[in-house]
Image (cartoon, rainbow, N blue to C red):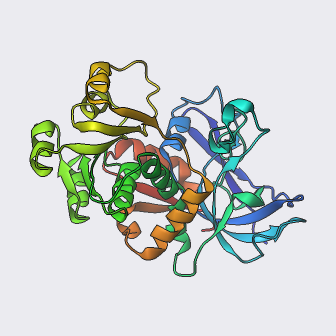
Amino acid sequence: MKELKAAYYVEKGQFKIGECIPHSPKVGEVRLQVAFCGVCGTDVHIFHGNMDQRVDAPLVIGHEASAVVAEIGNGVTNVKVGDRVAVRPLKFGPKHPVDKDHAHIGRNLKFIGIDSPGAFQNSWTVPAYTLHPLPDQLSLQHGAFIEPLAVACHDVKIGRVQAGENCLVIGGGPIGTLIAFVIRERGATPIVSEINPSRIAMLKDFGFLTVNPLSENIEERINKITGEAMCDCVFEVSGSRAGVETMTRVVNARGRIVMVAIHAGGPKPVDLFKFFWSEIELLGARLYEEEDYANAIKIAASGNIPFDTLITKINDLSELQAVFEEIDQNPSGMKYLIDCQA
């Protein structure tokens, strides 16, 4: 029997490959054979040392996972051994009155793969309720996209996007691109603002309207695209000062702005007068709920998202350090997948 491996974040800029110790599932738990795990922007923040106050290193991180059920604990009825699943990596703590029963943003929520061991390992034990069976037509590679796609589904749900609306997505990275696909599934028109030439070319190949704020006036371009109607809903995904400045300039009367990006780098100027003048709504969107996973799996299984094109590279678990270093040097990259069994 081969020795099981895991990749541990040990300190800023450093992973090490070590032993993975399988944990037999307790009541209500399931042990998984991890198939693929995507590298998330949050993982990159951890790699840069920006979350050391939260991450108890050395720790196995990673949370965008697909897997096969290897062993089930007592009381588990939603999956069986051999099932192919996606993981919703949220561990719900005790309810708190401030949560208003929204457990995914609860005060006592813990995120699996940040606050406890994650998926960059061969064997991983998680609560059974985190698991969502994958349909037969969805590969395990594509199943690793369910977590970020569920983020996109939640964002679009929060934005109350309706068929026929015009929507701007500021930032055409992995999440922004998936948001654009979900907007299109809703029957609305996505416009993506992006500055990276390679990503712009990819977005155009997907059939999306694009705007490059470095080379064109974004307000004039959107005004022309929409026939002067401007945008009913704007998704700020870039995390940039320019994105925040743009979002209020392109939204129409009683339009919605959904804050997707984590703006953790200090204050940014927001045009509060525009909120008053046009009765704009600003909506926060964080993580996902169970229904978002169901919707993500349905969209993924439809075949309408070209996941293979979104995969920049697939690497073995032993190459994780090099993958994170490459991500820092490749601004055109989209989704790096780690094969946790290779």
Q: Name the residue: 52% across, 76% down.
A: 138
Q: Residue at x 33, y 32 (%)?
A: 280
Seen from the viewer's position, the closer of residues 336 and 199 is 199
Q: Where is residue 339, by image quadrant? A: bottom right
- Quarter of the image with the N terminus in it: bottom right
> Would residue 190 be found to the left or right of residue 335 on screen?
left
Residue 7 locus on image (x, y percent):
65, 50
Q: From this view, report whether residue 163 is shown above or below residue 8.
A: below
Q: Residue at x 67, y 37 (%)?
A: 100
Quarter occupied by residue 261? top left
> Which residue extends farthest bottom?
136
Q: Quadrant of the C terminus?
A: bottom right
Q: Residue at x 49, y 41 (%)?
A: 285
List x then y, in percent, for residue 227: 10, 49
The answer, for residue 194, to whether it is visible in the render is no
Residue 204 spot, x, y in % from top left: 20, 60
The picture places residue 242, in percent across and down from the top left corner, at 26, 29
In this rendering, would 246 be left or right of 256? left
Q: Is residue 243 above or below residue 230?
A: above
